[in-house]
């Protein structure tokens, strides 16, 4: 047999073995799922979509599980463990999935505690303890404790979505650890199940620990007393390895503390008794500015004698320019929170601290207002996402995310760390818990190419040595997981690491709990989540300018910090469908994970045709909230449009894509045939139900009434009888006749013309006004070829406007957002699209910029309503707020999403989620408004949602101002008046 034939035979044999192994693995998975479904009352999911959602956490790693189990109680956990033990299937407990070292991923069965085991079981204010299930979110515990003036001390930046079980697994800390310690310092007792099925109650003394475990641990500890007493660094953030020293006799044999931080490798927590601390009566935030992060780091330790609640640090390269105005002068800052029994005591303490810091700090600011404090803390908390992008837009990753050194060594360590980065040709943006000596950093590793991965490994080894040389811990908050466990011998020595292995084997002799983590770990450069992604950019429609034109890079933006999993009522817009459903697949992160797996092609195997991805994106409202609220700027509305374009290429689309996706065409036809009265009459007959069914429209929706004449026809008639007023000073603005204003809400357009002219501006329509369009409805339904045709025709007609450099005033926020963002990204090679995007102004922006001396009529009424989600995400509402203030319209508008979102809320199957989104913020705010309140909503969708779900009449700000030009507004004209005539 020749060499070629031999090679072919060997390859054939290898392929056959792989197929056999895959078949055996598949059958083992089937057997496990069948057995789990028979034994567990909670959900057992093994479909591609469910598995794809948990292949990753917030780390660089990816592992594909066999199934996901959502246990209902401890009995379900025991039953699942029994099945997995019998079949030899590994188990990984998982909370919010925000771990940054890879320990919340696994190849066996993932136990998802967030679905059912998420309750605060009891709060004992006298004992200052609470009993919780592992899936309870930290903020939910703090709310329950807050009713008694108490709180749980540790508070990671992911506090709105991380779980107590996950915090116990990682020994999480957060910004208040200088005052209240780590999770281990705040755990009193744990109810645990081992992989072998033993139940244990872990607490000091070990009375509730099975005798086998207790005797084995005492033997292990008794034989290594000297090593355990001297071999662990003495620093506040020593998280790495097992806390075996907690089992020393002089430390009370604290089993709960020894277990905390074990990353799901020893047992599964089913309940926890935790310590609560008293909340200060008042807090003041002192923000101290320093020349650079090393100066801030060296100053941090000097502030600890003042007993602050936090000493957090971050450098200027992590703060967006728009938010610099919130901070005092400096290149780096310390966020130092001080508490007191009341506001006066807290402020006095903060002032003393600032006086003590005056020699080192360049500037400082004291913030006592809770809203101001929240705004500043958001700057700090968003750093975990912001740091994933370097200032030039290149990607940066965790991996050496949270090393800790003694606080007094932090300044020297940071200098050495910066030098090490430079030696390896890497960049990073440090920030973190300076008071505890713990630094977070994302580094611009290349984790895709072989050379980059090799450099990642070399740097990791060198940095481990640097941390140890400074007396530090490889992990200071997030655990070792796969990211650092391989290097634990550098920190502890091989003998102590062998002790960790013996401790693991005592608990889990079968090695079934989270294998490959912490003990006998995978290599730090294995299982990288980028490995299966395509190496060359896919052919796509959007330009993805922030991602080098690469859709894979755009999807990689999601690093898993899961701010999109914030619960209902949280600030911001993102993510309305998750807030309505509570399901991971309907969060921005969940959708990004499914897109990642679609590109990887191992779990989700149908590419652009994937039904798993389509189903998850179906409830995406395309609100663009994530573009603004996601710390790394994931833009799921764009990804959805891209996906739908490819998903339906060459295939029949849902009917709603033809009816509502091409709405401008149908409305134009109605205007041309002047059939609006006839259609309005038919909408009030039984034929309407048939029309909705045929058109893919939700049966619960009313078909909006059409005006007798569109805005442009009214405007032209007005211009024939009233010539255009020449602008004072030659200021001319072009008013964009968007589809919604022109064909559905002409009163808003008429009012805008009136106000703009009253402000001294010459208002003109664009050339070919009847045919210009932003393409929004085509975009939101993924008809991107059609959207580009529409936009090119529009640009052809607008060339005179673009040549003249005239501002283009757009009344409808989503249309303005489409022109600002979608147009240049869909037509990246057409410079006219960028020029049009730069010309777009909202109504308030146009008045502020081009009629700065105009004073609006004084109205003097409170307002309620909603800032449109696209305005929040793309356009900003600062000019609108200032205009309302000048007009005496007091109070603020709700954020969030109304839930209608263009075609979304009208599509069949979406009504329930659409209504739930409106009930989150908008409808409660309007119901709670005092009589006489003016209801404002610049978006037609928001106004329609208010009318159809609550019977409220809201108006565009232009309508309110136009009415007031004639004098004080009258009673039934607007405000909270109910809609009485559809």
Image (cartoon, grey):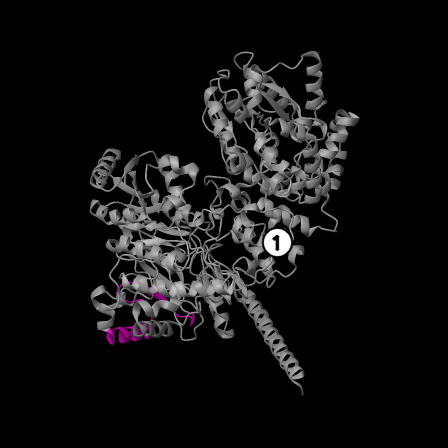
Above or below, comparing residue 648 to residue 424 in the picture: above
Question: Residue at the spot x=23%, y=36% of the render?
Answer: 351
Image quadrant where one finds the C terminus: top right
Depth check: 923 or 786 in front?
786
Which image quarter: residue 840?
top right
The residue tagged 1 is: 613
Report x, y in % for residue 638: 60, 45
Which image quarter: residue 309?
top left
Report x, y in % for residue 847: 53, 22
Direction from residue 889 to residue 404 in the image, left or right = left
Q: Is residue 972 in view from this perspective?
A: no
Direction from residue 226 to residue 877 in the image, left or right = right
Image quadrant where one finds the N terminus: bottom right
Q: Residues within 10 Å of mark 1 (few under 14, many from 20)?
A: many
Which image quarter: residue 978?
top right
Report x, y in % for residue 448: 52, 61
Direction from residue 857 to residue 835 in the image, left or right = right
Direction from residue 960 to residue 494 in the image, left or right = left
**What are the residue bounds of the magenta stretch?**
195-224
Report x, y in % for residue 412: 27, 55
Residue 948 sits inside the magenta stretch = no
| Total numbered badges shown on the rendered structure | 1
Question: Residue at the spot x=72%, y=28% of the render?
Answer: 770
Question: Residue at the spot x=56%, y=46% of the render?
Answer: 545
Above or below, comparing residue 861 to residue 793 in the picture: above
Q: Is residue 730 in view from this perspective?
A: yes
Secondary structure of the residue carrying numbered label 1: helix
Above or below, comparing residue 244 to residue 589 in the picture: below
């Amino acid at each position: 047999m020749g060499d070629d034939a031999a090679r072919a035979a060997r390859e054939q044999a290898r392929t056959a073995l792989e197929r056999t192994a895959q078949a055996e693995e598949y059958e083992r998975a089937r057997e496990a799922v069948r057995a789990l479904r028979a034994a567990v009352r909670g959900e057992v999911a093994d479909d591609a979509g469910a598995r794809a959602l948990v292949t990753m956490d917030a780390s660089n790693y990816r592992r594909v599980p066999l199934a996901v189990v959502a246990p209902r109680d401890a009995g379900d956990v025991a039953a699942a463990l029994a099945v997995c033990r019998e079949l030899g299937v590994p188990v990984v407990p998982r909370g919010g999935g925000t771990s940054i070292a890879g320990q919340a991923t696994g190849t066996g069965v993932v136990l998802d505690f967030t679905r059912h085991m998420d309750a605060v079981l009891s709060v004992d204010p006298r004992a200052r303890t609470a009993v919780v299930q592992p899936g309870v979110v930290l903020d939910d515990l703090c709310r329950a404790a807050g009713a008694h003036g108490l709180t749980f001390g540790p508070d990671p930046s992911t506090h709105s979505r991380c779980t107590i079980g996950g915090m116990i697994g990682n020994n999480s800390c957060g910004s208040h650890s200088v005052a209240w310690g780590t999770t281990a310092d705040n755990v009193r007792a744990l109810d645990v199940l081992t992989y072998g099925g033993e139940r244990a109650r872990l607490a000091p003394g070990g009375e509730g620990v099975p005798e086998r475990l207790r005797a084995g641990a005492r033997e292990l500890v008794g034989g290594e007393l000297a090593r355990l007493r001297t071999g662990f660094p003495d620093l506040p953030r020593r998280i790495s390895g097992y806390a075996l020293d907690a089992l020393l006799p002089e430390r009370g044999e604290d089993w709960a503390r020894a277990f905390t931080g074990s990353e799901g490798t020893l047992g599964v927590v089913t309940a926890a008794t935790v310590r609560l601390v008293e909340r200060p009566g008042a807090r003041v935030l002192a923000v101290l500015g320093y020349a650079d992060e090393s100066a801030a780091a060296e100053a941090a330790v000097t502030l600890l004698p003042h007993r602050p609640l936090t000493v957090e640090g971050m450098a200027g390269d992590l703060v967006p320019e728009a938010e610099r105005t919130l901070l005092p002068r400096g290149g780096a800052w310390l966020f130092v929170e001080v508490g007191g029994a009341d506001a006066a005591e807290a402020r006095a303490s903060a002032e003393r601290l600032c006086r003590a810091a005056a020699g080192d700090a360049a500037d400082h600011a004291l913030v006592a207002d809770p809203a101001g404090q929240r705004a500043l803390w958001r700057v700090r908390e968003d750093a975990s996402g912001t740091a994933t992008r370097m200032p030039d837009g290149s990607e940066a990753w965790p991996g050496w995310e949270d090393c800790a050194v003694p606080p007094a060594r932090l300044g020297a360590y940071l200098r050495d760390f910066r030098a090490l980065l430079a030696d390896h040709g890497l960049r990073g943006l440090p920030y973190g818990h300076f008071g505890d000596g713990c630094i977070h950093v994302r580094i611009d590793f290349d984790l895709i190419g072989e050379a980059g991965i090799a450099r990642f490994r070399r740097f990791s080894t060198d940095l481990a040595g640097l941390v140890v040389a400074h007396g530090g811990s490889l992990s200071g908050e997030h655990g070792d997981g796969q990211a650092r466990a391989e290097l634990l011998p550098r920190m502890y020595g091989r003998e102590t690491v062998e002790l960790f292995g013996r401790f693991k084997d005592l608990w889990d002799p079968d090695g079934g709990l989270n294998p490959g983590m912490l003990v006998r770990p995978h290599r730090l450069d294995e299982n990288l989540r980028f490995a299966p992604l395509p190496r060359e950019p896919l052919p796509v429609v959007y330009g993805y300018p922030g991602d080098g034109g690469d859709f894979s890079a755009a999807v990689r933006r999601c690093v898993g910090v899961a701010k999109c999993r914030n619960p209902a009522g949280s600030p911001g817009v993102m993510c309305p469908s998750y807030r309505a459903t509570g399901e991971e697949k309907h969060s921005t992160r969940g959708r990004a994970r499914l897109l990642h797996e679609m590109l990887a092609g191992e779990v989700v195997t149908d590419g652009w045709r994937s039904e798993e991805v389509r189903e998850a994106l179906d409830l995406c409202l395309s609100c663009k909230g994530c573009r603004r609220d996601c710390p790394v700027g994931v833009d799921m509305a764009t990804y959805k449009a891209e996906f739908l374009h490819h998903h339906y290429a060459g295939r029949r689309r849902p009917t709603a894509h033809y009816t509502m996706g091409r709405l401008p065409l149908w409305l134009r036809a109605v205007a041309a045939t002047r059939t609006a009265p006839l259609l309005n009459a038919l909408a009030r007959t039984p034929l309407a139900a048939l029309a909705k069914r045929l058109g893919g429209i939700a049966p619960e929706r009313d078909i909006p009434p059409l005006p007798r004449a569109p805005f442009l026809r009214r405007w032209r008639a007005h211009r024939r009888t009233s010539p255009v007023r020449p602008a004072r000073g030659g200021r001319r603005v072009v008013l964009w006749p968007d589809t919604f204003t022109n064909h559905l809400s002409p009163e808003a357009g008429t009012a805008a013309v009136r106000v703009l002219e009253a402000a001294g501006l010459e208002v003109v329509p664009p050339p070919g006004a009847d045919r210009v369009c932003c393409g929004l409805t085509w975009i939101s339904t993924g008809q991107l070829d059609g959207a580009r045709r529409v936009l090119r025709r529009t640009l052809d007609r607008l060339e005179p406007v673009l040549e003249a450099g005239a501002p283009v005033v757009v009344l409808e926020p989503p249309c303005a957002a489409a022109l600002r963002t979608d147009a240049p990204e869909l037509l990246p090679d057409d410079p006219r699209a960028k020029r049009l995007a730069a010309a777009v102004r909202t109504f308030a922006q146009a008045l502020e910029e081009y009629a700065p001396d105009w004073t609006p009529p004084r109205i003097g009424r409170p307002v309620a309503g909603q800032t449109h989600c696209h305005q929040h995400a793309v356009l900003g509402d600062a000019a609108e707020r200032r205009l309302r203030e000048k007009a005496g319209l007091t109070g603020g508008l709700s954020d969030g999403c109304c839930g209608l979102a263009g075609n979304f809320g009208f599509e069949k199957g979406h009504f329930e989620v659409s209504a739930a989104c409106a009930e989150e913020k908008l409808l409660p705010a309007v119901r709670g408004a005092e009589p006489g309140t003016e209801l404002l909503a610049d978006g037609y969708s928001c106004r329609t949602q208010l009318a159809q779900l609550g019977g409220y009449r809201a108006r565009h700000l232009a309508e309110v101002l136009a009415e007031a030009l004639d004098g004080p507004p009258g009673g039934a004209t607007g405000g909270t008046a109910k809609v009485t005539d559809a």
